Image (cartoon, rainbow, N blue to C red):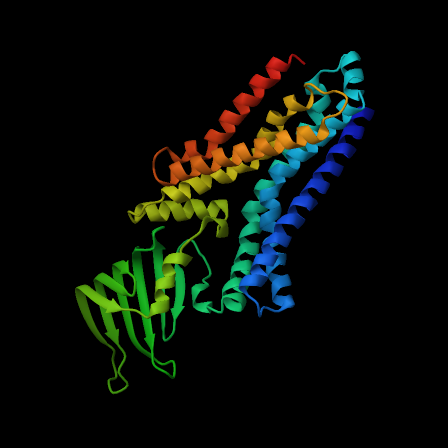
Amino acid sequence: MFARIDRYLLVLFWSAFFAGLLVFLTLFLATDAISTLVKYKDISSMILLKYYAFYAPEVIYKMLPIACVIGMVVTISSLNKGSELVALFASGLSLFRISRVIFISIIIVGVFSYFFSDQLMPVFNRQKNFIYYNEMEKTPSRFQTIKTNKIWYRSKNSIFNIKTLNIEGNKAQGLTLYFFNDKWNLVQMLTADSVLLNGSQWILKHGTITVFDQASSFPLNDKFIEKTIMMTEDAQDLRSTGQTSDLLTQKELSRFINKNKEAGLDTIRYEVDFYSKFSFALAGLVMSLLALPFCVGRGRGGGMMRNIGISIGLVVMYWVMHSTAQTLGQHGQIAPILAAWLPNVLMLSLGVFLLLRSNR
């Protein structure tokens, strides 16, 4: 059962948490909406509302660590400002005991963040992409339903299925291509074990051509070792709409990585994203621990704005380290698991060091 001080701290933390989350969410969406309106001048308000209704969960997910830091800083700084923190220290409570309930709350946020990103975010992102490509960009051919075992794609009078596609979008495995006439009658089917995608020029290797001729009772088959075909211009958009980790659950992403590895394709970027889903869930805890020593340092009479400014600086420093590690990992400079966890380990170590030096 929580003590009275714990209940008091919970009220302070969650109030600051939701206030900070609301402020950052509003600022981000308002800024992004203005740029969207400038780019798409003829977009209707209903489409805009639908788009941001499905975009808001992604923004909330990314803002959760920042809201945790704001909640921690405002709570401890409020105690510091009113000299309540001094009274608590005088009563024999340590800084860890005082902030314990706050860290428990942040861990709960981290668990929620992980399951939210793993189970719900893919659904929201698919809907967001559908609205973006179909109703804003007016290029429905660029939208696809992402699956772990195949990619379906439509390009004018053709539909094709690709089992796996590398991250650069220039090499695929397991192609099945269907050609239709203007009445959408199947006239030709083409399969290939592997494909090299060079813009609209596709080089197919080890496949079969099947022609469906109305004058013949049976389809005509012909095998080939290598064949070059020219696709329509919009088929080049496949490169920019390949598999993305934010549309896959952790389990689906794991199967996708294994399938691509079996096909001999590069999976480094996906492995970085796979481990990052775990590490990012703890970002709020790590940054809050790092911000804590600055809330109990000098300036017991106030300094909340200074503390918030320092915390925002720490958040920026974390994001710089996170982005740098991600880039290094995606380019194979460091191991994927290291790219995902290195910022957390470094920031956590710095936070523990500062806490030990504070002698609280």
Residue 268: x and y, percent? 36, 41
Find residue 41 and report its horizontal and vertical position in percent: 57, 67
Between 108 and 297, which is closer to the camera in this rendering?
A: 297
Residue 123 is situated, as x and y percent measured from the top left of the image, at: 55, 55
Quadrant of res 6: top right
Residue 53, compared with residue 303, is above or below; it is below
Left or right for 324, reference 222? right
Q: Is residue 24 above or below residue 293?
A: below
- Image mark count: 0
Quarter of the rendering occupied by the N terminus: top right
In this rendering, position of residue 337 left or right of residue 306: left
Vertical arrangement, residue 266 with respect to residue 188, above or below: above
Examine the image and state in which quarter residue 62 appears. Answer: top right
Q: Residue at x 70, y 24 (%)?
A: 99
Residue most extreme to the bottom: 215
Q: Residue at x 46, y 63 (%)?
A: 143
Which quadrant would the C terminus be assigned to in this image?
top right
Identity of the residue drawn at 30% across and 56% down: 172
Residue 112 visible in the snapshot: no
Residue at 36 percent of width and 44 percent of height: 267
> Could you tell me if residue 107 is visible in this image?
yes
Q: Specify whether 115 is left or right of 86.
A: left
Point out the residue furthest to the left here: 225
Residue sitting nearer the eye, 86 or 241? 86
- The image position of residue 297, as x and y in percent, is 68, 19
Q: Is residue 80 left or right of residue 39?
A: right
